[in-house]
Amino acid sequence: MVKKISLADKFSIFWRSLFIQAGWNYKGMISMGFSFALVPMARRLYKHDPAAYNAFLRRHLAFFNAHPYFASYALGAIVRLEEDIAAGKVSVEQEEHFKNALIGPLGALGDQLFWGIIRPAVFAFGVLGYYLYDDINDQLTILLLLFMLYNIPHLYIRIHGFSRSYRDGYQVCRILKIENFKYLKWAYMGLGLFCVGIFAGLNAPIPPHVYPMEFLIFIVSIVAAAYLKILKARTYFAMTIPILVALLLELITGTL
């Protein structure tokens, strides 16, 4: 008999995964929260087998770490593999090897996308909104927009990760790269740059006049930096080259 969990079990697992960091610790990282999320599955598959039930929980209490949102990509795949283990199609060793292999990609991808792009962009939007609006009703509206801007991609990653990885199983590794989230990445990078640019423009001192050559040097520097980043150059390189170009142009034109 093929052992499968129900739709209600999947919903319960997903709901529990929202609290995956509630049991965070230095020894197992998020393994306690990960195991807590999988309890409905253990009950379904090993309800009448206490030894197998305990073994299930022990192996998932071993060290595991990932970005808390992207952990859903591991969670769905493990649910799929646990069904295969119960059916005798996959070994526990194969599952553990796969689970350990996910630690690096899930942590790096989540940190880059959320902590490095989405969270700073939403923060910049909030600072700009608070700066522009003094009325409490407008500020509450900005607060609501902040909540939506952050939690729409957050919940999308959790829901999509769980459903997609359950469907794909081992093959979920194919989509765990930043290129597959490029639209989300570029949208929030654009939002962050727009907000920072507007805020800087509103607070920058306005000179009495701007010389055409100085403006040209400024534009060339920006274009050079943007081009180098598109080529995925190192950050310091993308900063240094435009500065050197600007200095060279200033020397040539005699504006220094």
Image (cartoon, rainbow, N blue to C red):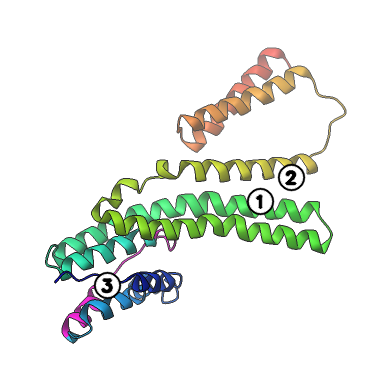
Residue 192 vertical placement versus 166 (above, below): above
Name the spot of residue 240 as percent of width and height, x first.
Answer: 55, 31
Q: Quadrant location of residue 20? A: bottom left
Label 3 crowd (10 A; few <14 / some 14-19 / many >=20): many
Residue lying at 82% horizontally and 38% vertically, measured from the top left: 205
Question: Is 148 on the left-hand or right-hand side of 46?
Answer: right
Give the SS element for disc 1. helix
Q: Where is residue 83, by image quadrant?
A: bottom left
Check disc 2 and report its element: helix, strand or loop.
helix
Residue 29 visible in this rendered orientation of the protein: no
Q: What residue is pinned by disc 1?
A: 124
Q: Is residue 198 visible?
A: yes
Mark 2 lies on residue:
199
Q: Is residue 115 magenta?
A: no
The image shows residue 135 at horizontal and vertical percentages of 84, 60
Residue numbers of the magenta segment: 51-70
Q: Residue at x 66, y 51 (%)?
A: 124
Q: Is residue 67 magenta?
A: yes
In this rendering, the answer to whether 131 lies above or below 233 is below
Asked if marks 3 and 2 touch (Cβ < 8 Å), the reply is: no
The amino acid type found where label 2 is placed reads: Phe
Q: Residues under labels 3 and 2: Cα distance?
A: 47 Å
Tell me which numbered mark, 1 or 3, is placed earlier along the sequence.
Answer: 3
Q: Secondary structure at mark 3?
A: helix
Question: Does 159 sit left or right of 140 as displayed?
Answer: left
Residue hosting label 3: 60
**Label 1–label 2 contact, CB within 8 A:** yes
Question: What amino acid is at disc 3?
Answer: His
Mark earlier in primary sequence (3, 2): 3
In the image, residue 199 sits, relative to residue 126, either above or below, namely above
What amino acid type is highlighted by mark number 1? Answer: Ala
